[in-house]
Image (cartoon, grey):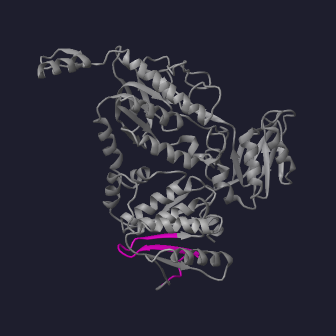
Amino acid sequence: MLDANLKQQLQTYLTNLKHPVELVRFVDGSKKSAELSQLVEQIAALSPLVELVEPTGDVQDERVPSMLVRSSKTGSEIRFAGLPMGHEFTSLVLALLHSGGHPMKVEEALIEQVRALEGEFKFETYISLSCQNCPEVVQALNMMAVINPNITNVMIDGALFQDEVNDRKVMAVPSVFLNGEVFAQGRISLAEILNKVDTGASKRQAQAIQNKAPFDLLVVGGGPAGASAAIYGARKGIRTGVIAERFGGQVADTMGIENFISVKKTEGPKLVASLEEHVREYEVDIMTNQRASALKGAQQEGGYIEVELENGATVQSRSVLLATGARWREMNVHGEQEYRGKGVAYCPHCDGPLFKGKSVAVIGGGNSGIEAAIDLAGIVKHVTVLEFSDILRADEVLQRKARSMGNIDIIMQAQTTEVLGDGERVTGLQYTDRQTGESYNVELQGIFVQIGLVPNSEFLEGTVELTERGEIIAGAHGNTSLPGVFAAGDVTNVPYKQIIIAMGAGANAALGAFDYLIRTPEPAVATDDGSEQSADKAVTSEETAAA
C-alpha cells in the first residue's frame, strides 16, 4: 500500500507524536478491506506510539471498510470510511499527528472558540479522493474533533459508498452533514464552519475589524495578485492589511499547474499554501472569511478610503488594492440554480467520481471544457460536449485526444436553454441547434459548466471605471479611475488571465500604491487644541516637544 519512500516520510512525521495514538479497523473480506488492513498495519509498524487495537462493543453502525484514529490521552475520535489516499493522505497524517499531541497550525483564538462550543456535533464529510478542495474541509473538522471531545468527524469516500451517496442525494463534494442534516457543500474553512455553528462569531469578528486602526495599504483579495501585493507592501514598511474570503481564489480549485515558471509542475492547493505561508512571514494583518460589499473614495486628497464588509464592519486605508479575482461563469438558464450541487457542477476533478458509470454533459469547448471531457471520459459512461460556436477553441492536441475517445460526443452550435430535473437531481438538459432552430433533450445525470470566468466586481459598480464585461480598468501602474485605488489580477482588464501574470500585476500595483502614498499628504489628525494637521506634521511636533 505504502511504498518505501512514503513509509520513510511518514515515519519521520510520526516522530513528532507526543503521546500514544490508537488505530481501529473495521473490515470484511473485500479487496478494499484488505487494502485498508494493510495500510493500518504499515502505519502501526512505523512508530511505537501507534497501536493497532481491535474493535470492541457494538460495531454494527460502523462503515466497512473504515478506520478510526483515537487519542489515548483525550479519547478524541476521527474516522475515515474508505482508504484515505490520494489528496486525503495528508488528512490521515495530520489526524495521527494532532491526535498524538502535535501542535496545530491554527490561530489560538480559533482553537479556544472550538473548545468553548457546547453540545454534540457529529459531522459526516463526503469526498472524492481526486478532489483538491476536500482535504481542507476534512482537516478543519478533524482538528475540531481533536480539540473538543463533543465533536466527531468521519471522512466518507463517495465513490466507495455509492448507496449512501444515492440515498442522501450527494452530487457534489465536499458535502458535509451535521447530526444527520445537510450542513455545507463545497469548500468551507474552519472560520466559516465556526461562523455557522457559533452564531455570535460573525458579530464578534465585525467588531474586532471595526476597531482596527487605518491601514496604509489594504489589499482586497487573497489570490496570487493579492498575496504578491501584500508582500510588496509589507516589504516597503507600510501598514498592510488583507481582506479575503479565502487564500488562493481560483488557484485553489486548479488541479495541475505546469506553466508557473521555475516550478515544472505543482497543484493549486500546494501553491496556495505556499502563498499564504509567504505572506504570513511578514507583518501583514490578514482578515479571512470576509467579503467586501462597498468601496467609498476619500473625501479629500490623501484622505482615508473606506471598504465596507458584508458583516457590517468598515475598514479604512490610505490606499486600496483590489484583487478580487474571478469566478466560474454560469449558464444563466432555467434550472441551473435549482440543481446546483444536485447534478450541476463546475469542478470535474472534484465531482467527477460521483458520476461513475453515468452520462454527463460538459458545457464549453475551450481548453477547460475539452480537458474536463477527457478527464471525465475515464470515469463516466458517456460525455456530451456542447459548444455554442461553430468552432472549438481548445488546443488542437486536446481536440484530437477527445475525438479519439469512444465515449465523447461533441455537438457544435448548441445553445443550452434549460436544465431538466425531477425536483431532486438532474435528469437531462435541453438545447437549441443554433443553425436549424430545433430543440433537443439529452438524458444525463450531470452537467459540468466550463464557459469561462466572471470578474468579482459587482460591488464596485458606480465607484471605479469598469469595462462592459465588468473588469476593472487598470493603468500602467495598476491605478484605477478612483485616486488611491489600485487593481491587479483577473478582476482587471489584463488580456491574459494567468497566475504568473497576476502575481506580477500585484507587485506592480503595490509599487504604484506605494508611489502614490509617498507623494500624497497623510490624512489630518486632531491635536490637543482641537485643530487639525497632517499626520507627518503631528509626529514632527511631538518629536520636537519631546526633545
Q: Is residue 426 above or below residue 48?
A: above
Q: Is residue 486 above or below residue 171?
A: above
Q: Position of residue 283 (x, y in %)?
A: 36, 38
Q: Which of these two is toward me, 190 or 302?
A: 302
Q: Position of residue 221 (x, y in %)?
A: 48, 35
- Snapshot quadrant of residue 5: bottom right
Residue 77 on the magenta segment: yes
Q: Is residue 178 above or below residue 543?
A: below
Residue 516 on the magenta segment: no
Position of 494 with respect to 52 (left or right) is right
Q: Is residue 53 above or below residue 112?
A: below
Q: Position of residue 441 (x, y in %)?
A: 80, 47
Q: Position of residue 462 (x, y in %)?
A: 49, 20
Q: Which of these two is toward me, 29 or 173?
A: 29
Number of numbered labels in the structure image: 0
Q: Which of these two is toward me, 203 or 513?
A: 513
The reply to whether residue 35 is in sight is yes
The reply to whether residue 84 is in sight is no
Position of 521 with respect to 255 (left or right) is left
Q: Residue at x 56, y 75 (%)?
A: 42
Q: Which residues are magenta?
A: 58-79
Q: Which of these two is toward me, 237 or 121?
A: 237
Q: Residue at x 34, y 35 (%)?
A: 313
Check the picture and name the quadrant holding the C terminus: top left
Q: Residue at x 70, y 52 (%)?
A: 446
- Snapshot quadrant of residue 485: top left
